[in-house]
């Protein structure tokens, strides 16, 4: 029984009716606080039960109704009849020499997606996926070459963080293991807006994962209408895949640019920062040898961003089988960074992690079958996406 169906039945019917089939049961990992409160009301219980549920789910790491000992037995029985606690299944785990870990997670019988944990001395970052595959067809990304199958549900997105916590040894009341969550895995988060937003609410809720808004980062290739929508919904750190200082090159590397060119994208970014009182937008820039790494391109990028709340994260290209690009040399990357800094733009170079298990930025491929590769470079496809509003 879906949440809205639970709400519409009325509290008595939901509490006394027969159990829902497994396909109808609502997965509690997909519900932010307001959704859990609505569910409790539909099950003829008080709103404080939602707070108790969140405490068991996220503070104590419990995934069995029968273990939630301070919930009344009849309420637990009603929960079990109409709801479930279902996590993504682990297909495989790989560990890199630098401590990075990558999980392949089952979406269904034929589809799988990946998440990556990156430990550092002062933080633990979990890179999670929002879709099985990706439809945006960025030229340098291994995920894009896999095509697209479907969006992940809110429960599958939240479930990644819950599952990683368990796998990494989270203990109730113990030190936080995952301090940062980045939506930089498989997929375009803003193309799955309706499922990503409730997941973000769970990440930020002090009764759930209680992450700072600065420690939850959403990365987008540049879906401009959805950035404006995001500004009205939630306050998280925004990262934008820029990768070129001009429209001609960016349209080749990031085809969504043909629909939303750089000037339109930057206007949306500055609007987001203004609306959410944010500190800055991070612009991701993958360094491709002989393509976008020239000093003149660094100067052009600095002219675009100087004077705005922006910082640039330079990402050495991570190769994958069949890739048409090469990584820029270290000297070229350092020159590019220094040129940006001289031009008044904060710039850093991302350290490559997990490369020996194909867990580095742009290398996630998962397992995508029954796929549809959407070539956003096509004018026809761009027009169709505009009419459809992109969000699947």
Image: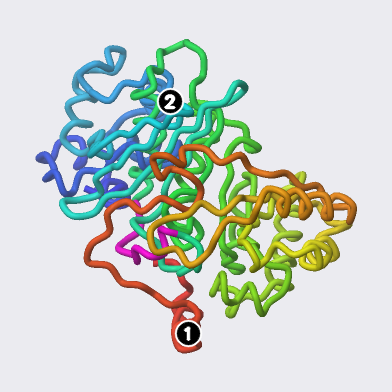
Q: Quadrant of residue 22?
A: top left
User: Which residue does the image show at 46% across and 78% down from the upper left?
Assistant: 385
Q: Horizontal placement of 372 versus 329: left or right?
A: left
Q: Give the mark toward the camera: 2 or 1.
A: 1
Residue at numbered disc 2: 51
Magenta span contains residue 150: yes
Q: Horizontal placement of 245 versus 31: left or right?
A: right
> In the figure, 213 relative to 221: above or below?
above
Mark 2 / mark 1, whichever is N-terminal: 2
Instruction: Residue lying at the far bottom in this picture: please name it.
Output: 380
Picture disc at residue 378: 1
Q: Which of the pair 253/262 is nearer the observer?
A: 253
Classify mark 2: residues with Cα within 10 Å, few (<14), some (14-19) or many (20+). Answer: some
Q: Quadrant of residue 322?
A: bottom left
User: Which residue does the image show at 41% across and 32% down from the upper left?
Assistant: 96
Q: Horizontal placement of 122 versus 279: left or right?
A: left
Classify mark 1: residues with Cα within 10 Å, few (<14), some (14-19) or many (20+). Answer: some
Work out how far the residue at label 2 is from the one at label 1, CA to CA, in angstroms: 48 Å
Q: Horizontal placement of 274 versus 229: left or right?
A: right
Residue numbers of the magenta segment: 142-152
Magenta span contains residue 214: no
Q: Quadrant of residue 241?
A: bottom right
């Amino acid at each position: 029984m879906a949440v809205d169906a639970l709400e519409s039945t009325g509290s008595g019917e939901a509490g006394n009716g027969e159990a829902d089939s497994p396909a109808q049961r609502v997965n509690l990992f997909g519900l932010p606080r307001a959704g859990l409160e609505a569910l409790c009301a539909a099950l003829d219980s008080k709103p404080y039960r939602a707070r108790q549920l969140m405490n068991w789910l996220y503070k104590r790491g419990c995934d069995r109704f029968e273990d939630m000992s301070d919930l009344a037995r009849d309420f637990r029985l009603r929960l079990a009849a109409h709801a479930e606690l279902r996590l993504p299944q682990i297909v495989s785990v790989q560990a890199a020499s630098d401590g990075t870990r990558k999980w392949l997670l089952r979406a269904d019988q034929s589809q799988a997606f990946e998440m990556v944990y990156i430990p550092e001395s002062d933080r633990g970052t979990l890179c999670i996926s929002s879709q099985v595959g990706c439809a945006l067809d960025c030229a340098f990304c291994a995920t894009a070459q896999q095509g697209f199958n479907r969006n992940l549900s809110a429960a599958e997105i939240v479930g990644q963080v819950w599952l990683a916590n368990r796998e990494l040894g989270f203990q109730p009341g113990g030190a936080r293991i995952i301090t940062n969550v980045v939506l930089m895995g498989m997929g375009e988060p803003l193309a799955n807006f309706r499922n990503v937003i409730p997941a973000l609410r769970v990440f930020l809720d002090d009764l759930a994962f209680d992450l700072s808004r600065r420690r939850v980062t959403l990365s987008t290739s540049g879906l401009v209408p959805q950035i404006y929508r995001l500004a009205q919904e939630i306050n998280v750190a925004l990262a934008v895949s820029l990768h070129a200082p001009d429209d001609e090159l960016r349209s080749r590397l990031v085809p969504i640019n043909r629909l939303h060119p750089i000037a339109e994208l930057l206007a949306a970014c500055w609007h987001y920062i203004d609306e959410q009182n944010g500190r800055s937008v991070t612009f991701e820039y993958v360094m491709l040898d002989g393509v976008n790494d020239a000093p003149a391109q660094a100067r052009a990028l600095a002219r675009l961003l100087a004077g705005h709340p922006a910082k640039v994260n330079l990402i050495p290209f991570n190769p994958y089988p069949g890739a048409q690009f090469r990584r820029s040399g270290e000297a070229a990357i350092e020159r590019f960074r220094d040129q940006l800094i001289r031009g008044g733009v904060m710039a850093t170079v991302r350290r490559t992690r997990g490369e020996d298990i194909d867990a580095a930025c742009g290398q996630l491929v998962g397992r995508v079958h029954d796929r549809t590769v959407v070539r956003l470079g096509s004018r026809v496809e761009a027009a169709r996406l505009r009419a459809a509003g992109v969000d699947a």
